[in-house]
Image (cartoon, rainbow, N blue to C red):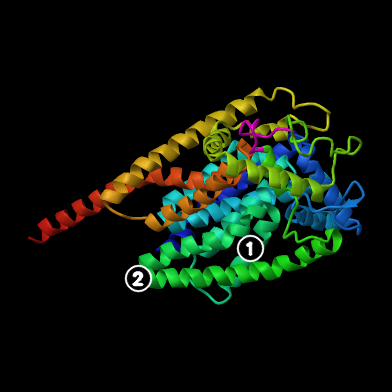
Amino acid sequence: MAQKGMKSSWPWMTGILILAAVLRVAWILYCDTVPVFDFLKYHLGAVSLAGGDGYRLYGNYTAFEPIGLGAWLAALYRLFGADIFVVKVANVVLNLGIILLTWMLGNRFFGRTAGLLAAGLVAISPRNIVYTSVVSTENLFTFLLLLGAVLMTSREFRGKYVLLGITGAFLAFTKPFMLLFPGLVFLVRLIYDWSEFRDFGGAFREGLRKMVFTFLVMAVVIAPWTYRNWQVFGKFIPISTNGGITLYLNNNDYAKGHWQDPFVIPGSPIAGMRNEETGFWDEIAVDEIAGKAGRQWILENPGKFFRLGFTKSYHVYKDASDVQYAIDYTSSGGPLPNRGWIYTWSKRAYLALMAGVALSGVMLLINLFTRRENLNGIWTILAHWLLFSATFFVFEGQPRYLFPMLPFLILLASFGLTFPLGWKKKTTNRSNRTSRGRKKK
């Protein structure tokens, strides 16, 4: 049924993809965003890598920014030249991939109508459009995350968990907390295998086996980069060196639940360690010192840490102000003129999405007590949401970190909006059967 639904949806999907492409190309031509902050470091590292000088920042070998985006940008720069516009065009392509994968998941989880609705909503989502002009991890990471979800929930086939392991490795290369990806595979496969065979013990063992295999493939893919870090720094660094500083700046007596400069926090153990000329630092020393301070604070202040976790989560969900990374930093040296309408529409779209998610919660409760349909898809979305929520809780809170979850939230909203249609369809079918029965009599 799902395959038939996908085939009959192609005319609609063609229109959705054309609309999405037009909106995104128009945006990158309209708004000339330039990379700043961490985005600039990714760009500089990629230029160094593409030029054959290795992954360096300010002339020094680095592992501070995870290699995933840097390697992707370096590949683009080697092929097409170190032009930021090339990245933006690649972001458009990745965004179209995000729409396709969202459609596949929606069709698989909730049916044809929900799949098309979810794809259409991603296509016109202001944040998804605006981020095509930003040189950041969001587009690449979200594409890989959705690809992993499609693979996890697909039928079993030879090589499936090899592909999942490779996908998980590139997810971890892009955002190191995805080293937890095998655990996500375990949860999702447990959901599907248990619902299919009704044998929790067997499903649990199968989930563990698949988790371990995925982890081993990931380890093989990641190992060369870890070995490079060992050679360069003389220390075991699986992927990056920014975990310690990120942990500390979000877990200290002065933490507010969002980013702050860790070098100027009162009593900061890494104060004075930043090079004022380059704006960089000894990343190994800072990672060790800051990480130790962050862990110690959490252990000594469990109550404050717990309360702070909710504050971090609030900063993730509070608004859609992360569009600032596209419209506040342009080649003119200042923000995009007349940018207020972008903030307004992004905020309205986000509020509408949250209303749709709230509606899906109501529909889920009705579903649990009546029809009990589409549960595997809902639990799969919630498993992804749980992983990200745990990350917000421990580390930093800002609206940009919600970006990879937007397609999943849109899928939930699409479920909530289309679920009542099932009742209408069932009522119509029941009426038709009754009418046919009366005619036979």
Q: Residue at x 34, y 44 (%)?
A: 363
State the mark number for residue 324.
none
* Residue 232 location (% of width, % of height): 86, 60
Secondary element type, mark 2 = loop
Assess whether residue 252 is covered by the magenta stretch. yes
Of the residues under marks 1 and 2, which one precedes in the sequence? Answer: 1
Type of the residue with mark 1: Thr
Q: Residue at x 70, y 22 (%)?
A: 338
* Residue 325 location (% of width, % of height): 71, 35
Type of the residue with mark 2: Asp
Q: Residue at x 42, y 54 (%)?
A: 379
Viewport quadrant of the N terminus? bottom left
* Residue 27 location (% of width, % of height): 70, 37
Q: Say whether marks 1 and 2 touch (CB < 8 Å).
A: no
Secondary element type, mark 1 = helix
- Left or right: 436 in relation to 398: left
State the mark number for residue 167.
1
Mark 2 = which residue? 199
Name above or below for residue 186 compared with residue 331. Answer: below
- The magenta stretch is 250-261
The total of numbered circles placed on residues is 2
Name above or below for residue 148 compared with residue 13. Answer: below
* Residue 328 location (% of width, % of height): 74, 29
Q: Is residue 136 among what the camera can see?
A: no
Q: As drawn, which residue projects farthest toward the bottom?
A: 158
Q: Quadrant of residue 165?
A: bottom right
Name above or below for residue 55 compared with residue 19. Answer: below
The crowd level at tag 2 (other Cα within 10 Å; few <14, some 14-19, many 20+) is: few
